[in-house]
Image: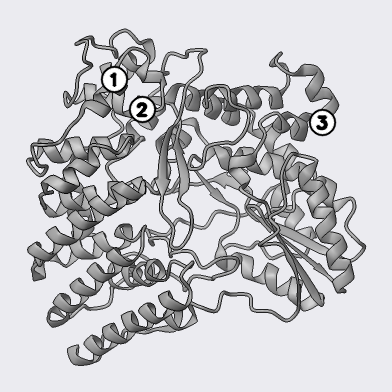
Amino acid sequence: MTPPSLDALLGRGYFPKELPPPFTTQPLGKLYADGFQVPAQNKRSKYSPHFLGRAGQLRRRLSIPHPVNQIALCDEIVGNWADIEKHFLKASLSLGLPVAARSPKSRGLRRMTDNLKREPFHAKLRGTHSFLVRADISRFYESIYTHTIPWAIDGKVAAKASRGRGGLLGDRFDSACQRMQDGQTVGIPIGPDTSIVISEILLTAVDEMLASQLPRGATAFHWVDDYYVGCDSASEGEEILTLLAECFAAFELALNPIKSKVIALPSPMRTIWNADLRAFRFLEDESWQYQRSRFVDYFDKAATLARSYPEQSVFGYATGRLRNIFFYEKNAQLLYEQNWKLLEYLLMQSVLSEPDIMKSVLPLVLKYQHFGLERDAWTKVLNTMVDRYSRYGLTNDVAWTLWAAICLDVSLAAGPTESISKVNDCSVALLALDARNRGLMDPILDTSLWQSALGAGGLFEEHWLLAYEAQKKGWLRPKSGRDTIASDPSFSFLRARDVYFYDEDVWTYIESQVTLPPVTPAPEPAAEPTAEVPEPVSAKEEPEELKGPLFDRLQLLGFDVSPG
């Protein structure tokens, strides 16, 4: 397989995809594509935490690693890709091994299969067995013990003998992961593509242990940390659950007792709660009156489901599917102007109902704003959301709401402004400073909390992103008045070449949403193993010829990995 490039990992696979559009690492990727190298520093750093809200669940922590140590880890991965692939060939049962993404609009890496390609795997398991063992690793990324990475690659005995010397590949990965989180040995960042590689290296060793002990005739595979094993009796299923727990424990991982179970077949492949929304159709060749009725029925169904399934992102799924139908698909279905006002208010209802919705709603609002916007209503909604999510600590929702306010030119009142000033998050701070610079923020904005992050050493602390961007753009200065970027070899190098991580060019983004060219229609999303919010459809990547030893191995197992 084609190895990933350093500029792709840094330019497209670095920041978490959940961040709002102005956060970018493309200038850093271009720097490496042009042959430049950021001066390395052998020192520890902290990542910037960022919190994602989820319907009816605890918030999820994402991570924005420091560029100096992220570059070092990417360099190790790219330079040793042949050895990583050789490791995957040992016994990987994964359908989600990382491969290089070719499209410049994709991430740096993509997983080997998508929802539609996984369905035949699940069908084969169900068609050849009477019971299904489904197992999940508890808090997978957060619980990874970095010292187990060399155990997985080099073996436990060799790894322990070499620890700290840097001679073995696993030891270098271990050290690189520790340096990017201030020496901590528990957890890897959620968000960067590099964590896909590290996690699959570890799970390949788990798979090797599991495959050598599975009962004869059992069929097993996994997608990320969700394991599926087919067997022929309930008692055999319980034994396999015990075996899975032992294999996980050998690498300091734990079985999730709530999500792990033995299921008698047949059982649904797709989740059931979203079936009606998944099958819902909006016919463009009908009258505007019919379309209006369909909108009401659709959101009524979503409201009913949200009450019945409070831990599912029902409105997230509903608005994500609506976005794909009326925004991303080729010849996107016609939205009648007479129905925009109704849809606009229903979208407002959605963003107030659940976290993590604005990313689906904002493209629709920008695309159809020429029909007119209810500005007073949006002002109330966005101010309410900023105040609410600031208090809840759901910083991703605060960030997306601030970005919506910037795009829609909506001002924030004194109350929400005060709430924002207490949010200790780099992305929120930068968006708030940008909004203030545009005259959209109440002058009461107190920046003292953020300014304190700009002091000596701040460029390697958890607010490194704020410390660099706020100084580079002239939005904040350290209390001392000292230019801390100038004294750091890495960041002074980046600034001298105009590398930025926050792009203020809001008009280019808005134009891209309004004039998005037609693209290939999205297939209906498969909901096995989860019913996640549909990802935005983008221009379809040319199918890569699936070849090489990893794909050969899957074909030997009897799985169809043909393109398309």
Q: Label 2 sits on what residue type?
A: His
Q: Label 3 sits on what residue type?
A: Gly
Vertical arrangement, residue 309 with respect to residue 377, above or below? below
For numbered disc 1, what is the local secondary structure? helix
Label number found at residue 463: 2
- Tell me the CA gap for discs 1 and 2: 8 Å
Residue 490 in the image: state x and y as whole percent.
38, 15
Q: Earlier in the sequence, mark 2 or mark 3?
A: 3
Q: Which residue appears at 69% of the width and 48% of the height?
A: 548
For numbered disc 2, what is the local secondary structure? loop
Which residue is the site of mark 1? 454
Residue 401 in the image: state x and y as whole percent.
25, 52
Vertical arrangement, residue 212 with respect to residue 323, above or below? above
Residue 305 in the image: state x and y as whole percent.
43, 79
- Mark in front: 2 vs 3: 2
Q: Nearer the viewer, residue 6 or 431?
A: 431
**Quadrant position of the N terminus in the picture:** top right
Q: Label 1 sits on what residue type?
A: Leu
Q: Which residue appears at 72% of the width and 52% of the height?
A: 255
For numbered disc 3, what is the local secondary structure? loop
Marks 1 and 2 in Cβ contact (< 8 Å): yes
Label number found at residue 155: 3
Marks 2 and 3 in Cβ contact (< 8 Å): no
Q: Nearer the viewer, residue 281 or 134?
A: 134
Crowding around mark 2 (Cα neighbors within 10 Å: few <14, some 14 to 19, many 20+) is many
Residue 316: tell me if it is visible. Answer: yes
Crowding around mark 3 (Cα neighbors within 10 Å: few <14, some 14 to 19, many 20+) is some
